Amino acid sequence: MISNDTALMAHLLRRAGFGANRDELEHYLEMGYDGAVEALLNPTDPGNMPDDLIRRYHVDQSELRDLPGSAAYWMYRMISTSCPMEEKTALFWHGLFATGYTKLNQARSLLNQVEMFRRSGLGSFEELLVELSKDPAMIVWLDNNENHGASINENYGRELLELFSMGIGNYTEEDVKECARAFTGWTLGNAEYMAIRAAKDSIWPYGRIAWHFDYRDEDHDDGEKTFLGETGRFNGEDIIAIIVKQEATARFVATRLFQFFGADEITEAGEKIIEEMMATYFSSGYQIRDMLRTLFHSGFFKSEEARFARVKGPVEMVVGAVRMAGNYRDPYLGIESVSNTMFYMGQGLLRPPTVEGWHEGAEWIDSGVLVERVNFVAKELSNVSSPGVRSIIDRLEAGADQGVLDPSELADGCLDLLGPLQVSDETRSVLVEYASRHGDLDLNGHQPGDQAEQQVGNMLRLVAATREYQLA
Amino acid sequence: MSTQTKSTGIVLDYVKTVGIVNNGYNGRGFANPYDIAVGGDNRIFVLNRCDPLRAAAIRVGICNLDDDYLGEFGRGFGAGDEQFVWPVAMALDSRDRLHITDEHNHRVTIYDTAGNASAKFLSHWGIPGAGDGELNGPAGIAIDSSDVVFVVDQHNSRVQKFASDGKFIANWGSFGSGDGQFNLPWGAAVDNDDNIYIADWRNDRIQKFTNDGEFLAAFGSSGDGEGQFQRPTSVAVDPEGFIYVADWGNERVQVLGPDGSFQLILRGEATVSKWAEAYFESNPEEKAERDISNLLPELPAHLNTPYHISSQTEPFFWGPVSVSLDREGRLYVAETNRHRFQVYQKR
């Protein structure tokens, strides 16, 4: 029988992380739910695979010239971190402030943006927007390097309002222009040279030159502006200070956080939580961490309604399976092919399809992608030589009566150790019926890769193919 | 411009930069160079580690200080003859036979470069494992005056000594941070007295041993100060006993005196190579913007680390993975992330 505490903690770790193996789950259970929420929301040392090791063996992840190695570098961080919420938060902002390699041809600077999300993604939304506006990758992605005092380019100003903070319908076209004026002069160092290199995808003569922010006072329009009803000689920081105090902004941020960490669909109960998160947004001074604390402590989040109410995104799917299997904890030849798998499932790290990011929820799954998802996870979890799978086998053996599990116990044990996962009666019947074909499982004296272990691997493979495993 | 600081007993003058990124599968240019060896005829052999997208072109390029690209050899990615997966380091013996380590294939490949326009494959040796003479991730390699070969057996935390045909002679070392212990060691060098120097990578120090493996000294500690290291990858020793260290994590080169005392730091001062000039002749608009750009920028605080500074400051070393010397007192610094090497001349 799965305890509610265990099921609730597993639920929290699917949302505030990438799921958890049983060792991690027990680690957080020792803290209690409140302690676990605080630990997740206050990352310390992530203990991830160190950069020096990655750089030594993967020259592509040292140079970060091309996309595959750069995506693999981030995947290593996700796989090996002990602060999963930090990476999950970075992934959330990467989807919301979607910036892609395709236009930039500059992976190092994209990863610098991701690092900024780690650094500031749980803090003040106002500070985050200032950092975003100074982020060189964003500046080039939305052409703010072409936004000059004498000739504005509205692209960044428009998306800042429409896609990054308030949402359409909450500002006028005049606000967009005034917003753009305020961000004139916000550019990157050597902007003209870097723009040529980005446009030509130039790596010459000595590889990429990464980017940094530069403010050109002489190119900034310092004139008076009227924005959202306020008038002044606004610069970018002033504009952001006005944006963040709008109710529309609070609703926008709360809704997006809810849909990523809470549930794909917004029910009446969900709407109530969004309003509570909005209240926290204002009372905390726009702190993302506090908004998420409100969500994680809400009755809705802890209820059955919220569990398995999200379709796992491809990154969650792949990283979760790899973490569960305990693989790729050391530099691994060919790691970029693993991160490419996410792209084939529809979510390539550092290459969102557009500035709108990915369409999430049920849109993650179509018939072709479903096969990719199931095949990848089944392969990871059925490999009985993987350390995480070996740990599952050992736990099954330890929990079995004299080392023997009947078909129901094998199915239930695997569902428990992969989650706990809650499956329908029909799904469970299929799993038990499959296990029955081989009779009772005797794990006494099992040896690496023997038939008994393969039976466990096959059951894990089957669980990976269930509808329920696709959900977080 | 000079980035050399605090010269006391030694002066190094910047000479030139050779290289350009090679984005293809062969021809002029380098792809993530990992080591350099200079032959008696002053031909320069450059080991191209290559990233996964270009792994089919893993090879050794040959050039000279006049910027002539003379050819290349190797058959790309794999475990067959003349193939490599993760090549690391090279060393020439007295007969100009070039020895190349491969930390994934766990072996040493030998080419004859004497009198050849390119090089002739001779053999490879090495068996994966942890027993005497077996290898687990061979990294640095050095050859003494008697053509005895020393291989840094990184994952076995030891140095192994072989005859020139690969026959095992001896080994020493274990995992740890005490004298004579190692933590993922990398580069190796031999001095005029056939003493052995090892870049003890994750212990941030250089260790010196007799030819038989007796511990003599250790130089350096973790940090970014003078005489401190962050993951030293390579070491070379000149005839006067000065010790050159690729201080990789600090994106710099340091020179120590024969007694290990700090002498100087190089941060790199690359200029436009001859091959790069040819590129800019074909791309004048890019050159025009480059000429009015500041390639030595001041960076925001969050980017103020050696790695980030180097990623944005093209003249500086970025990934200075190996230091090599020729017989005329020149120092060659190979930069993995900049696909070039910088040359200095000792006065």
Image (cartoon, coloured by chain):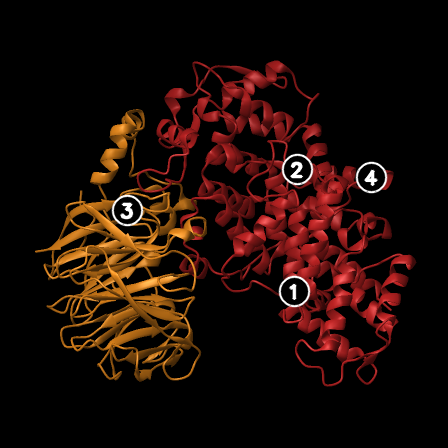
Chain colours: A red, B orange
Residue A284, picture quadrant: top right
Q: Amino acid at mark 2?
A: Trp
Q: What amino acid is found at the position of numbered circle 3 in the picture?
A: Phe
Horizontally, residue B274 falls left or right of residue B106, namely: left
Q: Are marks 1 and 2 on the same chain?
A: yes
Residue highlighted by disc 4: A272
Q: Which residue is mark 2?
A: A358
Of label 4 and label 2, which has the lower sequence position? 4
Q: CA distance from mark 1 to mark 4?
A: 38 Å
Q: Circle 1 sits on which residue? A: A325
Distance of label 3 from label 4 (alpha carbons): 55 Å
Q: Which residue is drawn at the image coordinates 14% and 56% (left, top)?
A: B42
Callout 4: 10 Å neighbours few (<14), some, many (20+)?
A: some
Q: CA distance from mark 3 to mark 1?
A: 41 Å
Question: Secondary structure beneath disc 1?
Answer: helix
Three-letter amino acid code at the position of disc 1: Ala
Helix, strand or loop at mark 3: loop
Circle 3 is placed at which residue position? B316
Q: Position of residue A409 (x, y in %)?
A: 85, 73
